[in-house]
Amino acid sequence: MQRVVTSHMCGDFMGPCLHTSLDGGVTMMEALNYAKLDYVSLGNHEFDLGKAQLEARLSSYKGKLLNTNGMDDQLKTLPKYDVVDVGGKKVLMVGLCIGDPSIYSANSCPEMKDFVHSIMAAWEDACSKGQHIDIVVPMTHQLIEDDRLLAEQFEMHETMSGKAPVILGGHEHTVFEEEVADSLIVKTGQDATKIACVDIWWTAKGVKCRHVLIDTEKFTSNGPAAAWADGKKKFVQAAMEAPIMALPSKMSTKQVRFEQSDLAAFLLEKLKRGTSPVLDAGGKDTDEPVWKYGHWPRRARRFFDRVLYVICFTLLFLWATLGYFLVYIQYLPPDPTDDYCGITAFLCLWLSVFAFVDNAGEKRTWIQRWEEFVVMWVLTSGLAQIGWELPYVLWKVRWLQPIQSATLLLLEFDDKFLKPDELWAWPFWMYASGDTRYMRQHSSSHATETMLVISGPFELWAVWMLKRRLRYKTVARWRRG
């Protein structure tokens, strides 16, 4: 039995990396050659260098860099595919990179064609040259959702159904091992801590596939490669030990992809001060604190240093817990307790406007203020739909409408009271004193409240996306017919 072993890396082989930031990718291209990888494909961070510099740097790679769907002039010298002969079976190797322009800078955004059409073009080109292709092994650099969709598209495709036993994936920083449709999807995560060994073979019933993940620390180091890597590591360590400036507190960029980084903000502020004389024609250095640009949990710190915000939400919490309990046990009367609670709730709903007020020494643009206001307002609205409107919609017809005291109130009798067995509905009765549609049979009002309840989870989802700095296209992938 003939065995053929190939090694692969699916993109982001030059960045993000400290060495590439210093030497434009020279070190990482040397690393690829020391690793003796047979095939690599492009990732989005390769284009951080700019297309011209990327083209110049790729020429030093001694393996095969497959570019199946890139259309830029700087990439046209790269092979679109390769064909490997395994005991008479022909395996089509292709490399594909994500085309979402939102993850690239405007001046280096590549033109990437659709994956399926690009693979079929490579398949047909190979067949036209006398190669009878048996299976395809895609090396992809995209989100796991897109890899799953690609596997489903393979299954439905007339030519490639059952002929893509494995998808070798990159881009994500976590490990994925999934079987989708007829394909195994394997992603080994970041920092080369794991290697996926994938075995593909043929039987009388067709092609088979299996894999195992192995920790890289189990492999012995190669002499020349290990010496080279040790030299590069010592250089970085020496550079990092050189003092640059004193930090005002303990800082880190470990979670910079997911949340605000104090260290990044601190360094960017220093950069801003250093370039301000050039950009601002004599801009002055100041001691204004850095605006804490981040996501809503960190922004909330600005809100909660407002005395009024703390007071109002404390009162609202007390009304919702202690106040409700005291009314329920008839220690407080339903009226005018409802007036005090209503005033507090009204103030709390509008306290998001404090997003427009800077802290002492803080200086933000109006765009930054509006961003903070939108996040806090959508969060407040989403919680209101789930915490308030949802119980109302579920309880209205069966339990709220039959309450006699509410009916009398709606008929404008002077009976502003609740019977002892009705005190559980005091919050809804309180609201109905202002909106008379609330506890009577009013179909359009009920339909409106139902739509608000449906919108609540979407509002909270939107807050989560804003918190993670996500776009809807990278969160929900809709299948196109």
Image (cartoon, rainbow, N blue to C red):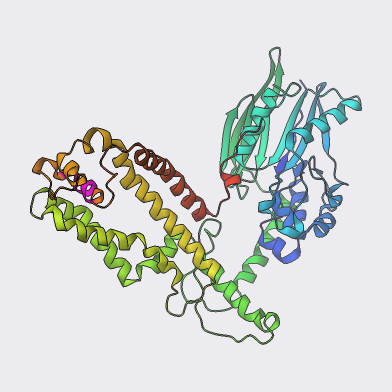
Left or right for 81, reference 280: right
Quadrant placement of the N terminus: top right
Q: Position of residue 282 (x, y in %)?
A: 67, 87
Task: In the rendered view, tell whether residue 258 sits above or below residue 244.
Answer: above
In the rendered image, the residue lying farthest to the top is: 204
Could you tell me if residue 68 is visible in this image? Answer: yes
Q: Residue at x 28, y 58 (%)?
A: 345
Q: Where is residue 334 in the image (x, y as percent from the top left)?
A: 14, 52
| Magenta residue check for 77 | no
Q: Residue at x 85, y 22 (%)?
A: 132
Seen from the viewer's position, the closer of residues 351 and 72 is 351
Task: In the rendered view, tell whether residue 227 sits above or below residue 423.
Answer: below
Number of numbered markers: 0
The quadrant holding residue 208 is: top right
Q: Where is residue 385 in the image (x, y as percent from the top left)?
A: 37, 47
| Magenta residue check for 427 | yes
Q: Where is residue 118 in the image (x, y as percent from the top left)?
A: 79, 36
Seen from the viewer's position, the closer of residues 172 and 227 is 172
Left or right for 86, reference 473: right
Residue interval drawn in magenta: 424-430
The quadrant holding residue 8 is: top right
